[in-house]
Amino acid sequence: MPVLSPQQVADFQRDGYLLSSGLLSADELATFGPAVDAAVASRTVDDTRSLADKGLYEQSFVQCMRLWETDSAVAPLTFHPALAESAAQLLGAERVRLWQDQALYKEPGGRETDAHQDATFWPIGDTPLVSVWIPLAGSTFASGAMGYVPGSHKAGRLHPVDLTYTTEPYDILSDPALGGSTTTYVEAPTGSVIWHHGLTVHQAMANTTDAPRRVFTIVYIADGYPRDAAWPVFPLDRDGVEAGEPMEGPGMPIVWPREPGDIPPVPEVTGEQTGPQFEVPQ
Ligand SMILES: O=C(O)CCC(=O)C(=O)O
């Protein structure tokens, strides 16, 4: 019995995003929330900078990647069967691989997340890609809700946005391909998650509350697609995947189908990637 209904899949295909509930139980949230908190605290223990001392990218969120590789209490969330099966439905794929997991904690006072498309950061060509955005205690307009330009995934790959401000970021919301469409912001009640297509233009509001907006995301790709180009990207380079070769390896394990509780071995070289996630291809 598929997890998502045909109507939910159709809504996702039309809009490029989908709010869904019932995939994570209250007990699971009560277990995974503190597990992700602990992982983020451990990864950031040496970072004593105030928000004001950080660059614009880091003022949007604290980003801790590939937590499944270092934190065994988080790994069952990364390989959560109902999430992985839902990803397979939305990707229209029989087999699905993990691209990455990450915590995105927007600190109190954290600025907005600038509008962008995810897939343009990576040399994956037209490989189907979908993300699930899991607010561990819900999200509100005040805490940093996500927003999506409905239907923007149909515009194809637009110019990548330099979220790190190494160069002036592309104003993707003004791209003619979006036809003037604007962002729809979505609050996610506790227990719900939001899916977005790899080409959906999305952004997030600032966190005006005095508590962090605690989010975990999992990014999935359909299995069986080749690397499209040689420009550097951590998961492919670590697993020695050359342009034209299938994207597979210990850092990109199959998440669906997979037996419940079967967590793959951690890749030999562990830890966070060295560069920023949102590296703009040169
Ligand atoms: O959580 C945010 O502020 C941004 C999330 C995002 O861009 C993503 O999940 O692709």
Image (spheres, helix red, strand yellow):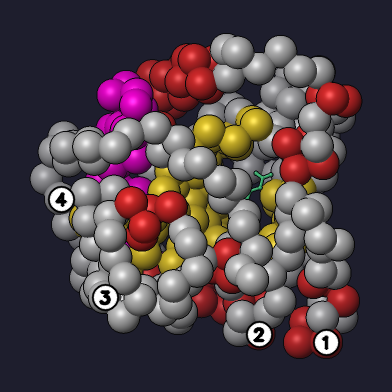
Q: Does the residue labelled 2 lie within 8 Å of ligand 1?
A: no
**Mark 1 residue type:** Pro
Q: Position of residue 100 (x, y in %)?
A: 41, 49
Q: Marks 1 and 2, how far apart in space?
A: 10 Å
Q: Residues within 10 Å of mark 2 (few under 14, many from 20)?
A: some
Determine which residue is flagged by label 3. 245
Q: In this view, does 38 lie above or below 13?
A: above
Which of disc 3 and disc 1 is earlier in sequence? 1
Distance between the Cα atoms at labels 4 and 2? 33 Å
Quadrant containing the N terminus in the rendered view = bottom left
Q: Which residue is identified by label 1? A: 176
Q: For mark 4, what is the residue? A: 258
User: Magenta stretch?
Assistant: 68-90
Earlier in the chain: of badge 4 and badge 1, it is: 1
Which kind of residue does numbered mark 4 sit on? Arg
Callout 3: 10 Å neighbours few (<14), some, many (20+)?
some
Inspect this view and state whether residue 182 appears.
no
Residue 174 lies in quadrant = bottom right
What is the crowding at mark 4: few (fewer than 14 residues within 10 Å), some, or many (at least 20)? some
In this view, the mark in front (3 or 2): 3
Kind of residue at disc 3 = Glu
Q: How far apart are marks 3 and 2 (CA)?
A: 27 Å
Amino acid type at circle 2 is Ala
Q: Name the residue under label 2.
A: 155
